[in-house]
Amino acid sequence: MVLTLYVDYVSQPARAVGILCKVTNTPFEEKTVSLVKGEHVQKPFSDVNPFKKIPAVKDGDLLILESCAAIRYLAAKYDGSGKWYPSDLAVRCKVDEYLDWQHANTRAHGVGIYFNKILLPAMKKTEPDMEVVSKHEKEMARVEEQFASYFLASKPFITGDSPTIADLVAAVELEQPKAAGYKLAKATEEFLARVRDEIGAELYDEMHGPVRALAKGGE
Ligand SMILES: N[C@@H](CCC(=O)N[C@@H](CS)C(=O)NCC(=O)O)C(=O)O
């Protein structure tokens, strides 16, 4: 069965599924769909994902268009260690709790900053709307505080001493506003450093190369 990831690593959920496959040594075929070039709204990709969003994951006949569903599936199926999506129900529930919470919090505001400050101006060749960016920055400070006080609560990772897909999804999202110049809190930076150590600095930085380069004006 061929596992195919449709990705552009400028996209944080694309990085999450890509990093998971790489750290678990899961073989996959990578199809790059450039967001800046608008390839996600054109054929052939729009035939794969009618929602026209990145990432899309195909495992044989199974098509998954939501990244959190995809990352849960990939970890449950391909991570032999069981560490990334633990089967213990209470631990798994804490992973799921973060994955559900982050959509309207870490993701909404991290994307709000990066999309409005970097991606939209790059796609449309326009100036960023800094009023919108600043609203997301205020919310991001609240998100960081809640992430540190409730989800981490003095632990190295969300469920304890070992990272799971929840930490991976958190890290890739938090890197987004950081790449756009938003100054993260010290506790957030320390969390990112722990995730980077666990993933391996080389892979972590390679996967964040495109998002950092685009923020600096490259492609
Ligand atoms: N809920 C989807 C959202 C995916 C999504 O919003 N992807 C963004 C990139 S991070 C995208 O493709 N944006 C292109 C657009 O909205 O035009 C998921 O998590 O997979």
Image (tube, rainbow, N blue to C red):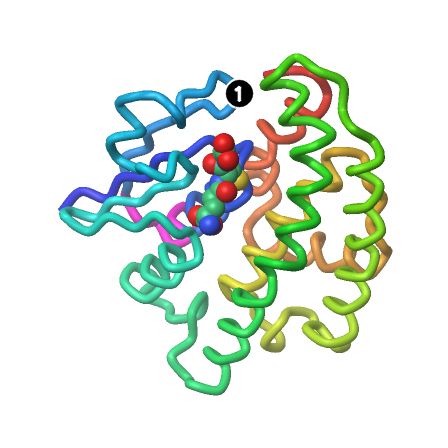
Rendering coords of residue 150 (x, y %): 73, 76
Residue 151 on the magenta segment: no
Quick one: which residue is furthest to the top in this view? 125
- Magenta stretch encompasses residue 26: yes
Task: Name the quadrant containing residue 210.
Answer: top right
Q: Is residue 179 above or below residue 1?
A: above
- For the C terminus, the quadrant is top right
Q: Residue at x 66, y 56 (%)?
A: 106
The spot of residue 53 in percent (x, y) is: 42, 37
Give the image location of residue 13, x and y in percent.
50, 46
Q: Is residue 5 above or below residue 25?
A: above
Residues in magenta, as a range? 21-27
Disc 1 residue: CB within 8 Å of ligand 1: no
Q: Is residue 145 left or right of residue 166?
A: right
Which quarter of the figure has residue 131? top right
**Pointer 1: what residue?**
36
Q: Residue at x 82, y 46 (%)?
A: 135
State left or right for residue 3 relative to residue 147: left
Viewer-closest of 80 and 210: 210
